[in-house]
């Protein structure tokens, strides 16, 4: 999806969104699948691919955790009644 619509992807990356977590799950599954593949074929290239995908998966997950912790107000839409209840009174 992101490959076919690069302008939409670029615009979506301007603000943090909880939807960014959707990138971490397939990446983690891909890393796990590459680990199983590397165990089966026992080739150096497969092991390098496994390591690269595992490191990338960990880095993406850690970055998402940091962004989520730093931007808690962006997790709910601004027209959400629960969001309005969490704002400090002026």
Image (cartoon, rainbow, N blue to C red):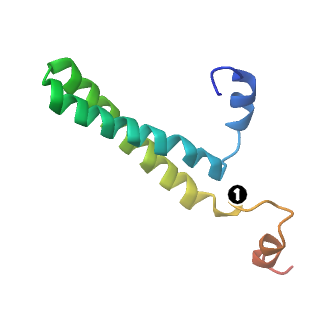
Instruction: Residue 76: give x, y in percent of width and height.
Output: 73, 62
Q: In the picture provided, is 2 more to the left or to the right than 54?
A: right
Instruction: Residue 87: give x, y in percent of width and height.
Output: 78, 74
Q: Residue at x 79, y 59 (%)?
A: 77
Q: Quadrant of residue 7?
A: top right
Residue 51 seen: no
Q: In the picture provided, is 87 more to the left or to the right than 70?
A: right
Q: Residue at x 64, y 27 (%)?
A: 2
* Residue tagged 1: 74
Q: In the picture provided, is 2 more to the left or to the right than 38?
A: right
Q: Nearer the viewer, residue 44 or 13?
A: 44
Which image quarter holds the N terminus?
A: top right
Residue 72 seen: yes
Q: In the picture provided, is 18 more to the left or to the right than 55?
A: right
For the residue carrying disc 1, how many other residues have a C-alpha within 10 Å: few (<14), some (14-19), or many (20+)?
A: some
Q: Nearer the viewer, residue 37 or 72?
A: 37
Residue 12 drawn above or below residue 62: above
Which image quarter holds the C terminus?
A: bottom right
Q: Quadrant of residue 46?
A: top left
Q: Residue at x 47, y 45 (%)?
A: 25
Residue 14 drawn above or below residue 81: above
């Amino acid at each position: 999806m992101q490959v076919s619509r690069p302008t939409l992807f670029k615009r979506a990356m301007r603000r943090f969104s909880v939807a960014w977590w959707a990138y971490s799950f397939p990446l983690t599954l891909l890393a796990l699948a590459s680990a199983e593949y590397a165990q089966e074929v026992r080739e150096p290239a497969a092991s390098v691919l496994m390591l690269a995908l595992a490191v990338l998966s960990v880095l993406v997950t850690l970055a998402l955790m940091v962004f989520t912790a730093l931007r808690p107000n962006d997790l709910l839409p601004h027209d959400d009644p629960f969001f309005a209840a969490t704002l400090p009174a002026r």
